[in-house]
């Protein structure tokens, strides 16, 4: 197993490899009661069924996708923890995509003011982003992740073999976060992706892509756990991406919305930070090589709806929408005062 340390309110490790089963066994050894939270497509998989037959724990099957990150699911989990008399020494394990680990971490952070939790991300986006860094939360009618906490897992096990269960579409959605990570901090990720010709080839190189991306995330989170400022660079592409996601009621994958958001942020960077237009074209080509969307249908996403959603995003402050942009690849910077006219003109460049 490859191990990467994260220093946050606690120190913990992200294990990258192929050993999620012994990881779960060690959690069962360390805690008397364990609540496993997983969506049905994971919980019913032969792997998990084999595991559940031999152990003493509670399994909660979540709704699929972003729908699980809501108050009613969290409430059902709190009720279950109460009925099962979970105490301070018991633990929660989230196995699934980013929505599941966000939910599991949030419920763990609130139960008895915080019990141990562990993340087993099964998607590429979950491995390189959501499960690492201790941001937990649920959505409200007003926006994504508006209720949540900074609450680190005891450890994370990114078992690369789970990626075999993903469709190409889901794998590519995760690549958007890998590409984001390359652009903000590690140009070797971009060099590697340049040499890769297909999604199949990217799958073969997943271990290295995950290890490099987690290393970046671990460094950033270890310097700025509570997002004083530096951590915001991880939000490159996310201000616009979150608005798109919400506007289409999560019909797009998170990474697909982020992909369009990356293109938007690169164009905005040209006007505000002097980002080279050739680099924007390069970013767009890289995203499209992995079948990621970079443009929007204006009939599905009109500007005033997206603007209203961005204004309500937690990244906006005092009515000012905040973006992360680039001066150059590997040189992120903050865009805090883009005019309404500039934002609209940038939107117009990415509509079909
Ligand atoms: N997903 C961005 C962060 O963890 O800060």
Image (tube, rainbow, N blue to C red):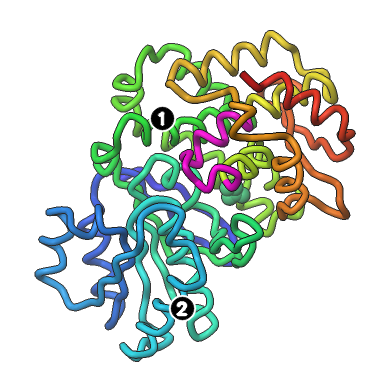
Q: Residue 311 at what x, y percent from top left?
A: 77, 49
Q: Give the residue drawn at x 35%, y 23%.
A: 202
Q: Give the residue drawn at x 29%, y 21%.
A: 200
Label of residue 96 in the image: none
Q: Residue 29 at what x, y percent from top left?
A: 24, 74
- To which residue does mark 2 refer? 75
Which secondary structure type mostly characterizes the magenta part of the structure?
helix
In reply to whether residue 248 is colored magenta, the answer given is: yes
Q: Which picture quadrant has residue 20?
A: bottom left
Q: Residue 330 at what x, y percent from top left?
A: 67, 26
Q: Nearer the viewer, mark 2 or mark 1?
A: 2
Query: Earlier along the polypeptide chain: callout 2 or callout 1?
Result: 2
CB contact under 8 Å: marks 2 and 1: no
Q: Give the residue drawn at x 80%, y 29%.
A: 344
In reply to whether residue 163 is colored magenta, the answer given is: no
Front residue of 19/267: it is: 267
Q: Is residue 184 above or below residue 80?
A: above
Quick check: 15 left or right of 245? left
Q: Is residue 346 above or below residue 23?
A: above
| Residue furthest top as drawn | 278
**The residue at label 1 has a CB less than 8 Å from ligand 1:** no
Front residue of 277/155: it is: 277
Quick check: 198 left or right of 248? left
Front residue of 187/52: it is: 52
Q: Regarding mark 1 in the picture, which secondary structure is present there? A: helix
Q: Residues within 10 Å of mark 2 (few under 14, many from 20)?
A: few
Quick check: 260 left or right of 74? right
Q: Give the residue drawn at x 62%, y 44%.
A: 242
- To which residue does mark 1 refer? 172
Quadrant where the image shows the C terminus: top right
Query: What is the magenta range?
Result: 246-262
Q: Regarding mark 2 in the picture, which secondary structure is present there? A: helix
């Amino acid at each position: 197993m490859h191990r990467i340390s994260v220093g946050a309110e606690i120190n913990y490790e992200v294990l990258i490899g192929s050993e999620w089963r012994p990881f779960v066994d060690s959690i069962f050894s360390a805690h008397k009661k364990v609540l496993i939270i997983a969506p049905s497509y994971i919980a019913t998989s032969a792997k998990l069924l084999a595991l559940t037959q031999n152990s003493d724990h509670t399994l909660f099957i979540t709704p699929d996708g972003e729908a699980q990150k809501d108050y009613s699911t969290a409430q059902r989990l709190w009720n279950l923890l109460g009925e099962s008399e979970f105490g301070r020494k018991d633990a929660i394990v989230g196995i699934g995509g980013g929505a599941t680990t966000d939910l599991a971490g949030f419920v763990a952070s609130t139960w008895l003011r915080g019990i141990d939790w562990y993340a087993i991300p099964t998607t590429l986006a979950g491995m390189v982003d959501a499960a690492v860094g201790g941001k937990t939360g649920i959505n409200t009618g007003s926006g994504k992740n508006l209720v949540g906490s900074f609450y680190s897992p005891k450890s994370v096990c990114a078992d690369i073999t789970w990626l075999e269960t993903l469709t190409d579409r889901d794998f590519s959605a995760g690549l958007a976060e890998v590409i984001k990570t390359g652009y903000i901090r590690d140009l070797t990720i971009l060099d590697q992706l340049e040499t890769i010709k297909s999604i199949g080839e990217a799958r073969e190189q997943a271990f290295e892509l995950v290890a490099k991306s987690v290393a970046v995330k671990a460094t950033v989170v270890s310097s700025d756990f509570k997002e004083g400022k530096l951590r915001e660079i991880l939000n490159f592409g996310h201000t616009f991406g979150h608005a798109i996601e919400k506007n289409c009621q999560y019909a797009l994958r998170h990474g697909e919305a982020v992909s369009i958001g990356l293109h938007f942020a690169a164009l905005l960077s040209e006007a505000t930070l002097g980002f080279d237009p050739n680099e924007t074209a390069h970013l767009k080509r890289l995203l499209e090589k992995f079948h990621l969307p970079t443009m929007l249908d204006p009939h599905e996403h009109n500007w005033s709806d997206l603007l209203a959603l961005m204004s309500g995003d937690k990244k906006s402050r005092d009515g000012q929408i905040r973006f992360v942009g680039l001066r150059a690849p590997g040189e992120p910077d903050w865009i805090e005062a883009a005019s309404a006219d500039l934002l609209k003109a940038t939107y117009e460049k990415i509509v079909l």
